[in-house]
Amino acid sequence: MTQALDFIHDTRFEDLPQEIVHEAVRCIADTIGVAAGGSQTQLSGIIRSHAVRQFGGSSAHIWWDGRTASPAGAALANAMTIDALDAHDGHKLTKGHVGCGVIPGQIAMMEAEGRTDARELLTSVVIGYEIGTRAGISLHASVSDYHTSGAWIALATAALGARQLGLNRAQTREALGIAEYHGPRSQMMRCIDAPTMVKDGSGWGAMAGISAAYLARDGFTGAPAITMEDSELAGYWDDLGRTWRVAQQYIKLYPVCRWAQPAVEAVLRLISQHTVEADQIDRIEIATFHEASRLTTIPETTEQAQYSLPFPVAAVVVRGTLGVGEVTESGLADPEIRRMAERVEITETEEFNAAFPAHRIASARLYLKDGRILQSEATEAKGDPEDKVSDAVIWSKFHDLTEPVIGPGRADQLEQALRLLPSDADLGDLFGLLAAGVENSSIGDKNPQYKRRYSSTSQSVTAW
């Protein structure tokens, strides 16, 4: 535990390898872009108003809303807004996410405590990814149930809160214990089987972690955090500062559950290679791993669409693309997508089960009306840490998500502010761009920017 406490409080920007700083910028840009897209969902509208009413305050901003809340309230609203659009980064072995809670939690704390140094933002975000990713892996290794990301995000944001508040080691240990105890240990597969707005618990975890830091400052006790202090889990923590988990995050190219994306990729490659049109397909068979096989919903809501496998597969067949419009009103109302989704059959294989979670694999078989059968190879989704997307893809995705919400001019300003973070620019411009309210806008076909397709020299992706 001493090593973790030292890492939380003593790590400085100068301790970070240059490539890790670069990864932090990529993660922040990707997450903020997803927040912009998520801000247009019904879920985000509800939680933002809830945060203002129930977590009122004036020290931290709710992004692109114009209103303020307490740091815990802003972390709740902004993290759930990110979670509202399932396009944010994640880690294979956590089977979930870290940045969607760490980044809004850290920004809320820095706003509330008057911190504006950009390098502190980058340093703390890296610390948050390191603590949160290890806490998630440790939790999976030590308990039988599969919990949502909020469980380990609570620990990560508590660590960052303790750092921003200047807590001593003893207080920080209490904060981590409070966060682990109060953090949401909600059942992830429950939301997979019955998708609703509760999503991945990320906002509740961020709120719990920020609250834990303030409680510990006031003398509230809660240690130990068993996930971090159990001697049998020490092996997950002893490489802090040597192995950088922030570099192991995957980037999503589609706004749906990561488990569905290998199937989407497999089908997309088949229809592209063989120039197949939707009206040529009789049915589709997807072989995948058990957890993905439970994504069976034919959706009525965007939450159900994001936790479905047949629906995004059908959308990419019918439209040749899978973006925000396909998982919101435009796609949900498309009868062709719905008819195709009903023709998707899912099976699981022991081979793919054995590979999970280190590898998420699917294969596709298209049965054509002319009698041909097209079979894909075993496929993993793009964007894994072993197959990183380029910076060009990150920034193109960022603009595709932000421009329909804040306009091209403000999106360019936001990109510039993010690119300047390693130069230790003052964060006032970044905070101001996130704080300003925007006109209500809809998503999907009414904003053609969401339909733009992006590519790089090493990858060609049809998305957004």
Image: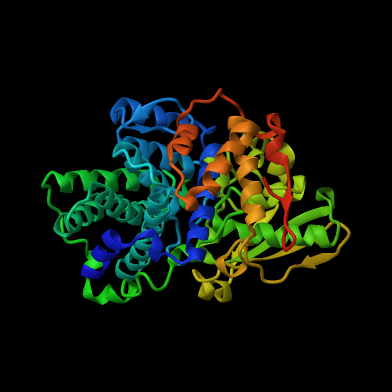
- Image point (36%, 28%), residue name: 68
**Furthest residue in direction right, as rendered:** 370
Residue 239 figure quarter: bottom left
**Tally of marks:** 0
Tell me: 93 left or right of 438.
Answer: left
- Image point (23%, 56%), residue name: 176
Tell me if I can see residue 394 in this picture: yes
Residue toward you, 428 or 333: 428
Above or below, comparing residue 130 to residue 52 in the picture? below
**Furthest residue in direction top, as rendered:** 439
The image quadrant where one finds the N terminus is bottom left
Tell me if I can see residue 327 in this picture: no
Image coordinates for residue 317, horizontal then vertical, percent: 75, 50
Residue toward you, 408 or 137: 408
Image coordinates for residue 403, horizontal then vertical, percent: 63, 35
Colour approach in the figure: rainbow
Residue 132 figure quarter: bottom left
Residue toward you, 455 or 24: 24
Residue 446 figure quarter: top right
Image coordinates for residue 192, horizontal then vertical, percent: 47, 52
Image coordinates for residue 440, horizontal then vertical, percent: 56, 24
- Image point (80%, 54%), residue name: 281
- Image point (41%, 52%), residue name: 119
Above or below, comparing residue 391 to residue 85 in the picture? below
The image quadrant where one finds the C terminus is top right
